[in-house]
Amino acid sequence: MSEWPDAWSDQNRRNQRGGGSASAQPEGPRVMRQVRRPDAGGHGAPRPAAPPYGGVPQQPSYGDGQGQGGYGQGGYQDGGYNTGQVYGGPGGGGPGGRGPGGGAPRPDWRRRIKWTAATVVAVLVVTTVGTYFWADSKLHRDVDLSKVIDRPEAGEGTNYLIVGSDSRAGMSDEDKKKLHTGSAEGQRTDSMMILHVGGSGDTLISLPRDSNVTIPTFKGSESGKVKGPLGPNKLNAAYAFDGPTLLVRTVEYNTGLHIDHYVEIGFAGFANIVDAVGGVDIEIDKAFKDKYSGADFQAGKQTLDGQQALAFVRTRHAFAASDLQRTKNQQKFLSALAHQVATPSTVLNPFKLYPTLGAGLDSLTVDKDMSLWDLASMFWAMKGVSGGDGTSMNMPISGSTGGNLVWDKAKVKTLVDELNNDQKVTVTSD
């Protein structure tokens, strides 16, 4: 008895999926009819050999990435995915490339280095030029040394007259109270130094403000008329009478030394420079206190901010030899300040360098012929003196009269001769 429904015939069963035969024996493999494709000449291609494996066409096989079993050889080539070589052979080179095996172009490191170097140089040049003009614009060239009359001949080397004035210009009442400057009208010189820069070593000479000198005839800075002489007086009185040009005239008259450049800084500017550089490290030999300047220091190494630094360089009432000890402290601090400004942590840090330059340059009053190069030369000479490469001294003193200090004329003459001839200084102030 048949298991298929009566309504189904053998033809129906043959038309079902699988195309099975009604025979009890399994159906043998069938060979697909080969289709000939015409060649370029229109002729049929030769009939391929009979497929192996009992007449069943061989299935595609995956190649090894080296062309075996690829297209045209009965298989499928994976294009090198198994070896990480997506395009082309070993080395990752692609068609048309310049790398090994036709790979991607190699970087032209020489060209990159050249372009990088050129860019760095260009940036440095632009920054340097920009900084120069910015710094140059901040200098106050207000002192005209051409108004100084009867000047001595210039000698070898360069002489700077460096002045710290008690100018309170631009200071508020709160600033004056904080810095203990008082509210006196006008301006006086709180410190005066001659810095000689030459080939035989740099020399820094402090001129005590209470030095007994002669104020000679001079040309008025405002009127242009010849005035004086004013006779014996304190050195700092010359500045009080007619400002920088009379001070230069008085120094030259009493020393015989030609002053090439003039540099002045006021109270506020001095404090701002110290604060901009982040304070100055200094060793204080002995504790002292002064209610007039606001000084209150312990002995030992410490960092002074702007307010403390100003008190340190102005103090004189705390010392027996008031003016001489003060000039020593001023030299010591200015040398320490120059050394601090020139450290890599300041010079290589634009966030510290530019505020320091801005505070310093904007606070300076210089002569009309002063260039940034001259200013830099002065600065490096002061740094050299602090490092032991030069001489630091007071003007030689022989005694006092009426409370004023009298210079040792013989020593002063020898000192000036050595400076004018740019010789190593042998004179001492002790």
Image (cartoon, rainbow, N blue to C red):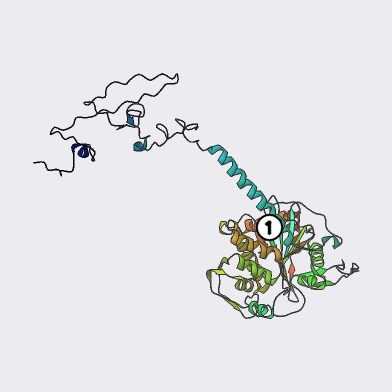
Q: Residue lying farthest right?
A: 225
Question: Compared to 308, does 410 lie above or below?
Answer: above
User: How many labels were placed on the picture?
Assistant: 1
> Which residue type carries mark 1?
Thr
Query: Residue 251: percent from the left, percent from the top?
Result: 78, 64
Question: Compared to 238, does 13 lie above or below?
Answer: above
Quadrant in which the C terminus is drawn: bottom right
Quadrant in which the N terminus is drawn: top left
Query: Residue 343: percent from the left, percent from the top?
Result: 58, 58
Q: Give the camera-side residue of 53 and 374.
A: 53
Can residue 367 be seen?
yes
Q: Is residue 73 left or right of residue 326?
A: left
Query: Residue 308: percent from the left, percent from the top?
Result: 60, 73
Q: Quadrant of residue 88?
A: top left
Question: Compared to 1, does 101 lie above or below?
Answer: above
Secondary structure at badge 1 equals strand
Query: Residue 85: percent from the left, percent from the top?
Result: 39, 36
Q: Quadrant of residue 428?
A: bottom right
Q: Is residue 80 left or right of residue 215?
A: left
Q: Give the camera-side residue of 269 and 107.
A: 107
The residue located at (67%, 51%) in the rendering is 126
What residue sits right under mark 1 in the picture?
203
Q: Quadrant of residue 297?
A: bottom right
The residue located at (62%, 43%) in the rendering is 118
Q: Residue lying farthest left?
A: 1
Q: Label 1: how many residues lie within 10 Å, few (<14), some (14-19) or many (20+)?
A: many
